[in-house]
Image (cartoon, rainbow, N blue to C red):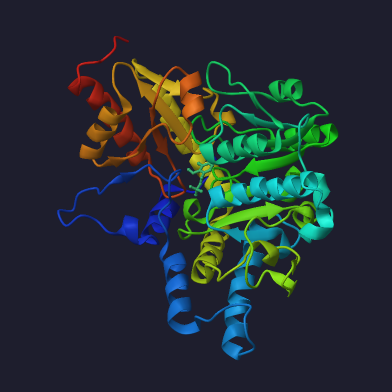
Amino acid sequence: MSTLALTPAEVADLRAAFPYFAARPADGGAGPAYLDSAATSQRPTVALDAERSFLERSNAAVHRGTSGAVGSATGAFEGARSAVARFVGAATPEQIVWAENATDALNAVALGMGEASAARSGGAGAAQLGVPGSERFALGPGDELLVTEAEHHANLIPWQRLAAKTGATFRYIPVREDGTWTIDDARAALSERTRVFAFAHVSNVTGMVAPVAELAELARSAGAVTVLDACQSVPHIPVDLESLGVDFAAFSAHKMLGPNGLGVLYGRPETLAALPPSRTGGSAITKVTMEAAEFMPPPLRFEPGTQPVSQVVGLGAAVGFLEAVGMDRAAAREHELVERLVDGIRATPGLRLLGPADTSQRVALAAVAVDGLHAHDVGQFLDEQGVLVRVGHHCAQPLHRALGMASSTRASVHLTTTEDEIDRFLDALRGAQRYFGVEAAA
Ligand SMILES: Cc1ncc(COP(=O)(O)O)c(C=O)c1O
């Protein structure tokens, strides 16, 4: 066991801090083996309580009006922004924009670029759009958008749509046989025509960790903006977006022990300042006439309408919880769990591991195909054993297609996961093989 990793006793204490894990079935059984944190994580009492106590005692319309109640609610709201900024290594809280979820955050970037492109092609330009500098995001024929074949649909479809709208060319880095791709693949695909390079820090199917800092540097030298899908990295490993050097990044509160209905868009100050808002309305503006509007600087420019205030406060508390544990210790612990998971899968004939076999290149999850079985049959069998995983295409159809399958079974861990849960998953997979009569010879 790594000296850095959380000890089993510490994991037991952590689990006691989550109502979901602390509650046991009345028959005293083990309870569900929750291995679906990559889809959504369970929440500690401290995050649930922060949201509830804000609503019970401090609820008010933030950034509106002059009352003391509004001032203290706004303080809690902005305090959480500062906490999230610190957590992901943003230099200032203004680099953190609230969105509905990561999907919404990624769309905000692609749609904003669409606004800039439409303004240029309509002859309006940045002045009329009210966002100085937005020309840098105007795309047209001859420009290229680059993604990878491994992307979640949330980091794929917005770019396909942007290409279709602007006439830019949509390109992708194909994955290799095991679903991975390399920096050399990226080097070969990037050119001076590439304007945007969007990719996941950690794949939600293969668990592959991309070498973000090197990729961002490559993209920058090609003149491209980097958009990082950090959904599966921020909840599991220390992430310093400033030193990674990406222009934009997106992640979801509900995957990092926080509430639903809240996502985060991170941006470098100069890139956020030049991005037009794709949604507009009240409280995001400085001046409105019957002809036009002038927008606030980021982040409020991107937050029109009434904000998800209690969720933001809940996320602030979730981040505090993660910081108190220490992301380096959580990451070391999760690495051990992933090794156990991957070793168990590889040791079982008839199971095909998706993604890198080298666990130093993977974070927090492993997806598997069971020879001779549809993932939904596997999922149903596992569910009956109380093992909760995700089955299906995990919103990554092109990746599954490239791997020659329609779906897979994914187990994902978090800092509360136990060895016993991993073993229950592996035993249940072997049980499914026996039950359906598809055991493979060793
Ligand atoms: C890699 C990745 N990107 C994007 C998303 C979308 O996140 P959300 O559904 O919270 O918007 C997910 C969620 O599963 C994901 O795993």
Q: Residue at x 77, y 47 (%)?
A: 122
Q: Residue at x 74, y 67 (%)?
A: 292
Q: Quadrant of the C terminus?
A: top left
In-front residue for pair 209/135:
135
In-front residue for pair 436/413:
436
Horizontal and vertical percent position of residue 262: 52, 59
> Up-down: is 441 above or below 268?
above
Residue farthest left in this picture? 27
> Up-down: is 64 above or below 413?
below
Q: Is residue 251 left or right of residue 86?
A: left
Horizontal and vertical percent position of residue 53: 44, 77
Residue farthest bottom in this picture? 67
Horizontal and vertical percent position of residue 11: 42, 51
Q: Residue at x 45, y 77 (%)?
A: 55
Q: Residue at x 80, y 51 (%)?
A: 134
| Residue 88 in view (yes/no) | no
Horizontal and vertical percent position of residue 421: 33, 40
Q: Indicate the quadrant where residue 138 lies.
A: top right
Q: Is residue 374 left or right of residue 367?
A: left
| Residue 397 in view (yes/no) | yes
> Up-down: is 315 above or below 224?
below
In-front residue for pair 337/305:
305
How many numbered marks appear?
Answer: 0
In-front residue for pair 299/330:
299
Q: Is residue 218 left or right of residue 348?
A: right
